[in-house]
Image: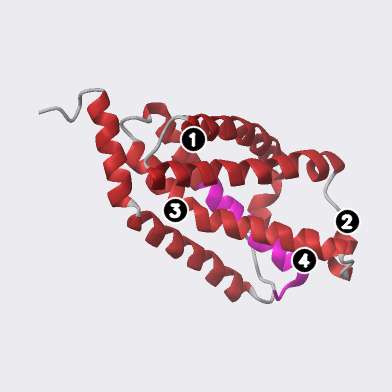
Amino acid sequence: MTGGSDGNERLTGRVAAILLVLLAAEGATLIAIRQLLLPHVFLGFLLIPPVALKLASVAWRMTSYYRQRPDYARRGPPAWPLRYVVGPVAVLSTFSLFATGVAIVLSGRRGMLVGLHKASFIVWFGAMSIHVLAHIAKVPGLLRDRLPGRGLRLALVAGVLVAGIVLAVATIPVADHWQDRATAFVGVDRS
């Protein structure tokens, strides 16, 4: 990626800013999950490509640091609690949260999958709260990007948003079925 470690940091920051907005919207659906199941599922699938890009950009930084690429090695590692505790927990719980969510929607099953999804969310929320608090102050500065490769970074972000929208739209029929089942449970869809 052009722009070196600074460019990678700008990409990570730009995706993080978008994720903050999308995750806040996703979190708002939890207020009335039965009635807002369709938007919850839609946003969940929309989030998959941006989350994948954020994980990839962080993995690139980590790999480049451990391979001792000069610009990444010069930056140094994150603080040890973020590096050894919060980061791994955040990554594993992110995978678990999204994998269980996708499995619930695609399999049409609830039961244990919903329990795992909820447990993953609790762990994820704790780890991500610490992660966000540790990095939030840097995000506004990272949105100013005049480094080489800026166009590529913007294209990557736009591409994952488009991919997320396409994926989310493709899941509407399945998500609508789930919404019908959820609202029927509370009597909204009864004729």
Mark 4 and mark 3: Cα distance apart in space:
27 Å
Quarter-wise, where is residue 64 in the image?
Answer: bottom right
Q: Where is residue 110 in the image (x, y as percent from the top left)?
A: 41, 33
Which of pointers 2 and 3 indicates the residue nearer the eye?
Answer: 3
Q: Position of residue 144 (x, y in %)?
A: 64, 62
- Of the numbered discs 4 and 2, the one sitting upstream in the chain is 4
Measured in 3D between alpha carbons, the distance from the residue under mark 2 to the one under mark 3, in whole angstroms, is 33 Å
Residue lying at 81% horizontally and 45% vertically, measured from the top left: 83
Q: Which of marks 4 and 3 is nearer the N terminus?
A: 4
Q: How far apart are marks 1 and 4 (CA)?
A: 39 Å
Depicted 162 relative to depicted 109: above or below: below
Residue 85 lies in the magenta stretch: no
Q: Is residue 7 within the magenta segment? A: yes
Give the labeled residue for mark 4. Answer: 5
Q: Which residue does the numbered mark 3 point to in the structure image?
A: 46
Nearer to us in this view, 113 or 191: 113
Q: How crowded is mark 2: few (under 14 residues within 10 Å), some or many (20 or more)?
A: few
Q: Which mark is residue 76?
A: 2
Segment tinted magenta in the rendering: 1-21
Of the 4 image quadrants, the one containing the N terminus is bottom right
- The residue sitting at 43% across, 41% down in the picture is 104
Which is the main secondary structure of the residues drawn in magenta?
helix
Q: Does any portion of residue 14 appear in the rendered image? A: no
Indicate the amino acid at tag 1.
Leu
